[in-house]
Image: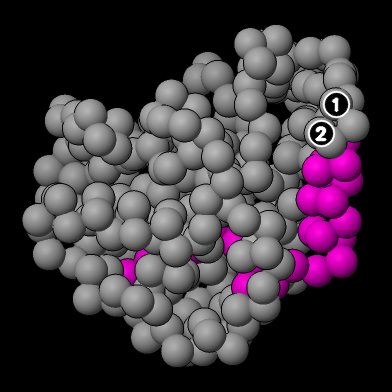
Amino acid sequence: MAMSGDHRQESRGTGTPLVLVAGTGSSGRVWHLHQVAALAAAGHRVTTFDNLGTPGRGVLRTYRMSELVDDTVHLLESLDTGPVRLVGFSLGARVVQELLLVRPELVSAAVLMGTRARADHWTLALAAADREFDAAQGTRTPRSAAIDRALRYLSPQTFRDERATRDWLEIFERAAGAGDPVIDQVDPADLAEDRTAAYRRIRTRCMVMAFGDDRITPAHLGREVADAVPASVYREVPGCGHYGYLERPKAVNSLILEFFGAHPSVSSTSPERDCRSPVAR
């Protein structure tokens, strides 16, 4: 395992280079719960890293999208491996999409999870409500913050699993109790811009993966990205929310590997055998 003090970077495995780009405020370590081992075992050298704005990497402030793209480009260039495969989630997927417009030669193929090209009314209203709450210096108990986060990011189907529900709420409550910072990692104006027309210029082979119960980036917005990017396919994983890659990791990993041609086809609609809990059983 290699680490870089600049990007808090970790790499595991050998073979085809694959870089995982995390969402807002998430450490690259989030991918180690379910993705890194599976992708490395399938013949990838998997690299994770902390984005700008990740707690622990540096000063928390609001960045422009171009800064996040440049930061990711710097990481890819430092690997010195030639074109890589990219997997981005949420904000990480938006970063990948913008990177494909400015430095497509760095990427051979990309998976875009929980993504969008524009902000619909719901997305804008949710973001505005959060900013108003912060401006009013609103406070929640760790338990109420955990409940709010679970309702936003998880599927109702997850709540049918008693153990998974306890695990998720414990993790969210612990993060809230530790003062887990919630910040506008990217300038709101950048996130509100409609990039649909721009994404029609992307020529890299892509898979857009949406999650059926996603309240943060609803599946129809992901389908719009797939419709815009010429060389793309669309896949939707049912029974999971915005954190679909953690709620249904087996289905998600199978689709990633199928797209990259490193795994036999596994239907995302096969009977549920995933661990919906973030904690390995």
Q: Secondary structure at mark 1?
A: loop
- Give the residue displayed 85% in from the left and 13% down from the top: 141
Is residue 200 visible to us here? yes
- Give the residue displayed 25% in from the left and 44% down from the top: 46
Q: Please, what is the three-letter code of the amino acid marked with disc 1? A: Gln
Residue labelled with disc 2: 134
Q: Please, what is the three-letter code of the amino acid marked with disc 2? A: Asp
Q: Secondary structure at mark 2?
A: helix
- The image quarter containing residue 9 is top left
Is residue 111 visible to us here? no
Q: Quick check: 148 above or below 41?
A: above
x%, y% of residue 2?
Answer: 15, 30
x%, y% of residue 22?
Answer: 47, 44
- Give the residue displayed 37% in from the left and 86% down from the top: 203
Is residue 279 shown left or right of residue 77?
A: right
Q: Quick check: 152 above or below 79?
A: above
- Give the residue displayed 74% in from the left and 38% down from the top: 154
- The image quarter containing residue 146 is top right
The one nearer the camera, 79 or 184, is: 184
Q: Quick check: 261 above or below 103?
A: above
Quick one: label 2, few (<14), some, or many (20+) residues within 10 Å? few
The answer to whether marks 1 and 2 mark residues whose Cβ atoms lie closer than 8 Å is: yes
x%, y% of residue 32?
Answer: 39, 30
In the rendered view of the protein, which quadrant contains the N terminus?
top left
Residue 137 has which mark? 1
Is residue 139 shown left or right of residue 4?
A: right
Is 70 inside the magenta-drawn segment? no
Residue 60 has which mark? none
x%, y% of residue 277?
Answer: 63, 25
The magenta-colored residue range is: 108-133
